[in-house]
Amino acid sequence: MGFYVIRRLLSAIPTLFIIITISFFLIRLAPGGPFDLERPLEAKVMENLRKIYKLDEPLWYQYWLYVSALLRGDLGPSFFFRDFTIGELFARGLPISIRLGLSALTLAVVVGGILGVIAAFRQNSATDYAVVGLATFGITVPTFVVAPILQIVFGLSLAWLPVGGWNDGAMRNTILPIVTLALPQVAVVARMTRAAMIEVLRSNHIRTLRANGLPLGVIVSHALRGAALPVVSYLGPAAAALLTGSVVVETIFGIPGIGRYFVEGALNRDYTLVMGTVIVIAVFVLVFNLLVDLVYALIDPRVRYE
């Protein structure tokens, strides 16, 4: 197992290098630059800014400077938030996005898993149809519709929760963003768990357990091991997306996570900010895909990485 992990980590290095290279040149193909404003700067000021940030150098040399700094752990300065480096922005925003994403992911796994198991054991019943209907609704309705509805109902009409703001991570301020992030994932996990559980419940070993009159809890625990595999596969990229922030949710609720940095960086041609966000997301995806493969081996004894 240890050699497999080392091999996967080593293979992730060229993958990350390719992502960095493509992103570096792709962002520079977009028209405009980081200092192109509605009211243009004076030519001398623009020249000095480009010289300070090395934008007057050839593109290949800019790439070499960026990769060299990246190898030292330096993500560079922000072109838009000029008083901060990318590392400082992420040090402030990434823990917030991780907290929201981890809470939403936990809620999705628990609630979605329970709903999927209940629907599978009551297949073709009213409960099953209700779970499938709610899951379909949760998948089809986008977060930019769900978030304002929750704000209107629970923030303005009932006045139970604040409609936005972070307030140093107070529980009341995190409930609506977490629920908004979790609802689509709850729907997906519920549907995947239901489908996998139905297939596992029809397998021979589960029929044997039922024939021997074992308690329902024992049957569920055995069935969940087989049904968890497709859910675990989905949770890898889903976890990476949730933990690196949601642009829509963080913007609507005014949360200072890193999700909004990607959009702000792209709109303002903040090359280093966009690159930093891409690198963080890529690292999360690679790490969580590795964790998914390791969890596979723990759940299914037939999977071995020797």
Image (cartoon, rainbow, N blue to C red):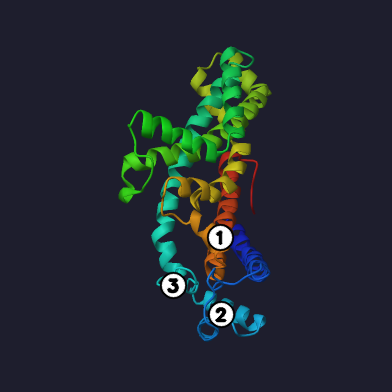
SS category of the residue bearing label 2? helix
Q: Amino acid at mark 3?
A: Arg
Q: Which residue is mark 1?
A: 283
Q: Position of residue 189 (x, y in %)?
A: 57, 34
Disc 1: CA contacts within 10 A as few (<14), some (14-19) or many (>=20): some
Mark 3 vs 1, N-terminal side: 3
Q: What is the quadrant of residue 127 in the picture?
A: top right
Mark 2 vs 3, N-terminal side: 2
Mark 2 vs 1, N-terminal side: 2
Q: Amino acid at mark 1?
A: Val
**Is residue 274 placed above or below 129 in the rendered structure?**
below
Residue 42 makes an appearance in the image = yes
Q: Is residue 70 left or right of residue 254?
A: right
C-alpha distance separating marks 2 and 3: 21 Å
Q: Position of residue 165 (x, y in %)?
A: 36, 47
Q: Nearer the viewer, residue 203 or 302?
A: 203
Disc 2: CA contacts within 10 A as few (<14), some (14-19) or many (>=20): few
Q: Nearer the viewer, residue 276 or 70?
A: 276
